[in-house]
Amino acid sequence: MDEMIKNLNSFLADLAVYYRKLQNYHWNITGKNFFTLHVKLEEYYDDVNAQIDEIAEHILMMGYEPLGTMQDYLDTTTIEEAKNEKVGEKVVFENLIEDYTILLQKATKIKRLADEKNHYGTSSLMDEYISDFMKKLWMLKQSME
């Protein structure tokens, strides 16, 4: 179980840093599609905020402690923070695709571990994330064409 909790906390850290990154992009996006992307980025970070809470509570329901400080998240994450600067849509799309790919890989790994341990609640939760991340990746890639 310790390996699954470690992976869930790593996933939680990625989500927390990604939330801040999305919000940073929301504030700093520039270009002709500003209005559309500003709204979409807010939708994304609202989704991620709910996921952060859900994963932390899931860890607690399993009897363990979720990471909870920014330092914990920064020490654990594989998601790179966004810089405090204006950013165009191409850079944002490229980074979102990279980050959602990381999150998809982590959710898939956690699902595999949960299935091995017959922890069906965790497995089922990861199904939702896998589906969500795959759809977002498809849509982002379509927007790049």
Image: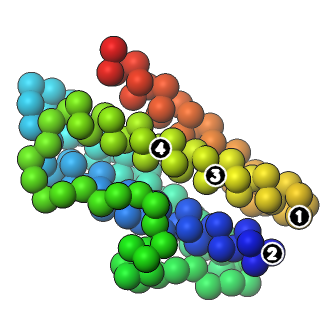
- SS at mark 3 in the image: helix
Question: Which residue is the site of mark 2?
Answer: 1
Question: Which part of the image, by quadrant, shows the C terminus?
Answer: top left
Query: Of callouts 1 and 4, which one flags the residue occurring earlier in the amino acid sequence?
Result: 4
Left or right: residue 19 compared with residue 68: left
Characterize the local packing of mark 3: few (<14), some (14-19) or many (20 or more) Cα atoms within 10 angstroms: many
In this rendering, the answer to whether 137 lies above or below 23 is above
Residue highlighted by disc 1 = 117
123 shown above or below 66? above
Tag 4 secondary structure: helix
**Disc 1 and disc 2: Cα gap in Å?**
8 Å
Asked whether the beta carbons under mark 1 and mark 2 sit within 8 Å of each other, the answer is yes
> Measuring 14% from the left and 43% from the top, which residue is drawn there?
87
What's under tag 2, amino acid-wise?
Answer: Met
**Dot 1 alpha-carbon crowd within 10 angstroms: few under 14, some 14 to 19, many 20 or more:** few
Pinpoint residue 108: horizontal percent, then vertical percent: 68, 48
* Residue in view at x 62 percent, y 85 percent: 65
Q: CA distance from mark 2 to mark 3?
A: 16 Å
User: How much space separates mark 4 and mark 2, taking CA atoms?
Assistant: 25 Å
Q: Give the spatial CA distance, label 3 vs label 1.
A: 15 Å
Instruction: Give the amino acid type for the residue marked by disc 3 in the picture.
Output: Ala
Question: How far is mark 4 from mark 3, CA to CA?
Answer: 10 Å
Q: Residue at x 75, y 78 (%)?
A: 2
Frontmost residue, 33 versus 107:
107
